Image (cartoon, coloured by chain):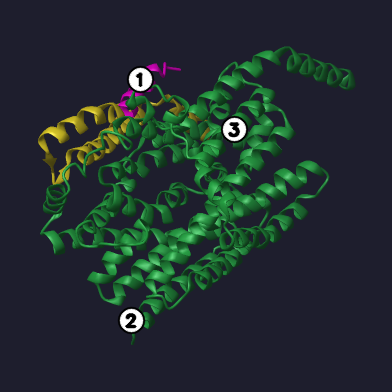
Chain colours: A yellow, B green
């Protein structure tokens, strides 16, 4: 079985990206009142990271060896 | 027709439809306890999706999140998150697999098997019980508020709660989890339609567009759409995002929804789709924000959504919102009722009297549904301060189970049953204490810098839990090891 460590790392990026960025986003919004796609910056950041998070996790899902293994088990 | 008659008829039609689908759901199913509580482990991606999504759009999502957007602005944005689903992606398939291998039907079963301790199972059932009853009460109170608002006061909250509870009790007794899954179908269709429509219409109608709305609000109340410097600050926001992501799947009914899956892959897929579905919460935020400059003087932020909808639309729309609200209360309510009843029947009664037959356990679970419903009703109508305290604490309580679940999948679990028992007890007591005195980090660490004081105080309970679990487990290692080897020896002797 291939190592899952890279997949865990990708998941960690998907997990931490949103909360860590909040600190900067809020500071920028306080200073400059930025709106992106109609939303205040902080809200845009949250939506952006849902989409990025899902994208990263879809990649993880594709590479996840567990899926293949289960398929094998099911067909055996 | 009068205003009341129109909106009440619409709500009534949806209630009858839900009841019909809920009862019909049992058709052609032989109801064993496994079928009734976890759908015979045969639900595909679509149904699990609906069951888990049920958790996304509860009464709290509709009233609470719009209320926060109305009252607290930027702080409400933490509801747009997917951190919990990333944890779910890795954790849930493990829980599902373990459940399948050992035929588990409850969260307590999981602890009994993993920690080899029926007593711990009862303890976990009790923690689940004291967390779920207040959660059920929140749904019921929300239901009463929604219906009395949507009926322009024609139906009292008390009457609404009775009607809702009777309907749910009937279809849960008959169909179990199948009823929840089928009513979730109309609930989710209705809620998405209503929320998207309102979330687009209200900003455009009052402000000309979504960006115009946000700019108008920010101009009128500078800083409202960001975070506060103190209190609901960045450090509160970030710590809450992370902390709340741990407890999400620790509800007893979340385990049940997981077990109901057909295979691990359908569960994984589900955790990838739910974040996209959760984006509809955006529209709830838009609705709440649209009320900021249009509605003043509501007695309770939670009814801001009804205030703005009633002043804008005819009773038809109010009725639809009421129907959507009704369903957001009864679908999660039905899962809670069913889970609680099967938990008591299976993990308390059967655990204490192991020779009870499966058939009898099933019947008991069924008849416990009205009993649990009655208990919830009593507390809903007489909520003293103790209940209010529990209502604040439910999420914090179940979160205390997280460390024990996660470590149980390690090759060498650093925790044993004594450690889990001690740690969870300490965690639960701290959560209760925090909510009792309204503590913040500042209460515990008055000299700390302000960013530290704003951290979500739930961290204290979880850390204390982890530390106590580890210490007690280490201290009792020899005890449980010698017991286990003694048990193994006696089993070996018997076998020989």
Q: Quadrant of the N terminus of chain B?
A: bottom left
Chain name for mark 2: B
Say which element carries label 2. Answer: helix
**Res. B260 in view:** yes
Q: Residues within 10 Å of mark 2 (few under 14, many from 20)?
A: some
Residue plotted at (52% across, 67% down): B161
Chain letter for mark 3, please: B
Would residue B117 be counted in the magenta stretch? no
Q: Which residue is mark 3?
A: B98
Between label 3 and label 2, give the one nearer the viewer: 2
Please give the range of residues in magenta.
Answer: A1-16
Do the residues at pointers 3 and 2 share their chain?
yes
Q: Position of residue B236 (x, y in %)?
A: 35, 33
Residue lying at 58% horizontally and 69% vertically, measured from the top left: B166
Q: Secondary structure at mark 1?
A: helix
Measured from the top left, where is residue A53 in percent x and y?
A: 30, 33
Ranked by sequence position, the earlier of labels 3 and 2 is: 2
Which residue has dot 2 on it? B3
In the image, B180 versus B93, the foreground residue is B180
Q: Identify the main secondary structure in magenta.
A: helix
Give me the disc on residue B415: none
| Residue B233 image offset from top left, x and y in percent | 30, 34
| Gap between marks 3 and 2 measured at Cα | 53 Å
- The residue carrying mark 1 is A9
Q: Nearer the viewer, mark 3 or mark 1?
A: 1
Question: From what the image shows, is residue B343 above or below residue B411?
Answer: below
- Is residue B404 toward the left or the right of residue B458 in the image? right
Given residues A46 and B468, the one toward you in this image is B468
* Disc number lying in front (2 or 1): 2
Q: Chain of mark 1?
A: A
> Label 3: few (<14), some or many (≥20) within 10 Å?
some
- Residue B96 visible to an observer of this rendering: no
């Amino acid at each position: 079985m291939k190592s899952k460590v890279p997949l865990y790392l990708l998941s960690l990026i998907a997990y931490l990206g949103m909360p860590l960025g909040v600190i900067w986003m809020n500071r920028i919004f306080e200073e400059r009142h930025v709106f992106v796609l109609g939303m205040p910056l902080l809200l845009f950041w949250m939506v952006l990271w849902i989409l990025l998070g899902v994208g990263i996790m879809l990649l993880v899902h594709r590479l996840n060896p567990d899926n293949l293994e289960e398929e094998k088990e099911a067909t055996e | 027709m009068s205003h009341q008659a129109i909106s009440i008829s619409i709500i009534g039609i949806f209630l009858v439809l839900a009841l019909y689908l809920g009862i019909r759901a049992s058709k052609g199913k032989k109801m064993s306890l496994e079928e009734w509580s976890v759908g015979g482990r045969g639900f595909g991606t679509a149904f699990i999706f609906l069951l888990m999504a049920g958790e996304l759009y509860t009464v709290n999502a509709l009233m609470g999140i719009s209320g926060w957007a109305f009252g607290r602005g930027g702080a409400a944005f933490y509801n747009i998150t997917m951190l919990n689903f990333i944890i779910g992606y890795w954790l849930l398939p493990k829980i599902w697999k373990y459940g399948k291998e050992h035929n588990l039907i409850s969260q307590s079963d999981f602890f009994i098997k993993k920690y080899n301790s029926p007593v711990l199972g009862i303890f976990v059932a009790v923690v689940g019980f004291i967390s779920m009853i207040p959660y059920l009460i929140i749904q019921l109170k929300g239901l009463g508020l929604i219906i009395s608002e949507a009926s322009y006061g024609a139906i009292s909250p008390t009457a609404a709660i009775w009607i809702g509870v009777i309907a749910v009790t009937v279809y849960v007794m008959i169909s179990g989890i199948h009823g929840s899954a089928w009513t979730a179908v109309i609930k989710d269709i209705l809620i998405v339609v209503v929320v998207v429509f309102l979330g687009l219409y209200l900003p455009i109608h009052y402000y000309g567009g979504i960006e115009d709305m946000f700019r108008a609000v920010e101009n009128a109340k500078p800083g409202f759409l960001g975070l506060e410097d103190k209190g609901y600050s960045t450090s509160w926001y970030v710590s809450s995002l992370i902390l709340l992501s741990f407890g999400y799947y620790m509800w007893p009914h979340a385990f049940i929804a997981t077990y109901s899956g057909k295979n691990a892959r359908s569960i994984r897929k589900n955790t990838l789709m739910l974040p996209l579905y959760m984006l509809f919460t955006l529209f709830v935020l838009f609705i709440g924000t649209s009320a900021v400059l249009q509605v003043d003087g509501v007695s309770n932020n939670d009814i801001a959504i009804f205030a703005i909808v009633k002043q804008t639309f005819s009773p038809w729309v109010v009725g639809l919102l009421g129907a959507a609200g009704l369903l957001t209360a009864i679908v999660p309510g039905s899962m809670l009722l069913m889970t609680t009843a099967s938990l008591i029947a299976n993990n308390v009664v059967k655990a204490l009297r192991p020779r009870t037959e499966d058939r009898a356990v099933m019947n008991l679970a069924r008849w416990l549904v009205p009993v649990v419903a009655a208990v919830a009703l009593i507390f809903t109508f007489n909520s003293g301060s103790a209940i209010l305290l529990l209502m604040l604490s439910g999420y914090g309580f179940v979160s205390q189970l997280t460390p024990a679940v996660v470590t149980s999948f390690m090759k060498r679990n650093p925790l044993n049953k004594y450690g889990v028992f001690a740690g969870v007890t300490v965690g639960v007591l701290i959560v209760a204490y925090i909510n009792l005195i309204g503590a913040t980090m500042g209460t515990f660490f008055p000299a700390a810098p302000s960013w530290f004081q704003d951290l979500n105080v739930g961290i204290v309970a979880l850390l204390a839990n982890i530390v106590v679990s580890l210490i007690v487990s280490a201290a009792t290692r020899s005890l449980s090891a010698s017991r286990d080897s003694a048990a193994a020896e006696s089993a070996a002797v018997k076998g020989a």
